[in-house]
Image: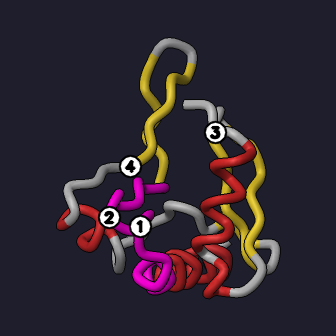
Amino acid sequence: MTVSAEFSDFVCELLSGLGEVSARRMFGGAGIYHDGLMFGLIADAQTIADYEAEGKGPFVYDGKGKPVRMSYWEVPERLFDAPGAMTPWAQNAYQAALRAAKKA
């Protein structure tokens, strides 16, 4: 999956309820950052159920011929039409990233 700059800008705008958000290219996609911390599409034990309830799965990429499963999960499509609804998901993902950073 290659993410265009236009789409990255669109996603950052959707997440603006969180404050300043930026995107950086990685794995052919883009990591979404707030206050220097990547939080885009991340899930942990506290948020996985939300993504699963929406029928979403983790980000998977081809790593030398075999799939590699990441801890980042796909955002439900319905949120792309509702910036206000996207903000709580972004807040939950950012909190998950903060918890993960404290463990590191």
Number of callouts: 4
- In magenta, the rendered stretch is 72-89
Q: Is residue 8 above or below residue 26?
A: below
Q: At numbered mark 3, what does the secondary structure look like: helix, strand or loop?
A: loop
Pointers 1 and 2 in contact (C-beta within 8 Å): yes
Among the two numbered marks 1 and 4 on one chain, the one whose residue lies closer to the N terminus = 4
Q: Closer to the camera: disc 4 or disc 3? A: 3
Q: CA distance from mark 3 to mark 2?
A: 19 Å
Cα distance in 3D space between marks 1 and 3: 18 Å
Q: Is residue 8 left or right of residue 79?
A: right
Viewer-side label of 3, 2: 2
Residue 73 versus residue 82: which sits nearer the camera?
A: 82
- Residue at left 40%, top 81%? 85
User: Which quarter of the image is occupied by the C terminus?
Assistant: bottom right
Location of mark 2 (residue): 78
**Of the image marks 4 and 3, the number of the one nearer the N terminus:** 3
Q: Which residue in the structure is indicated by mark 1?
A: 81
Callout 1 amino acid: Asp
Is residue 46 highlighted in magenta? no
Residue denoted by label 3: 3
Judging by the rendered image, the residue that carries numbered circle 4 is 58
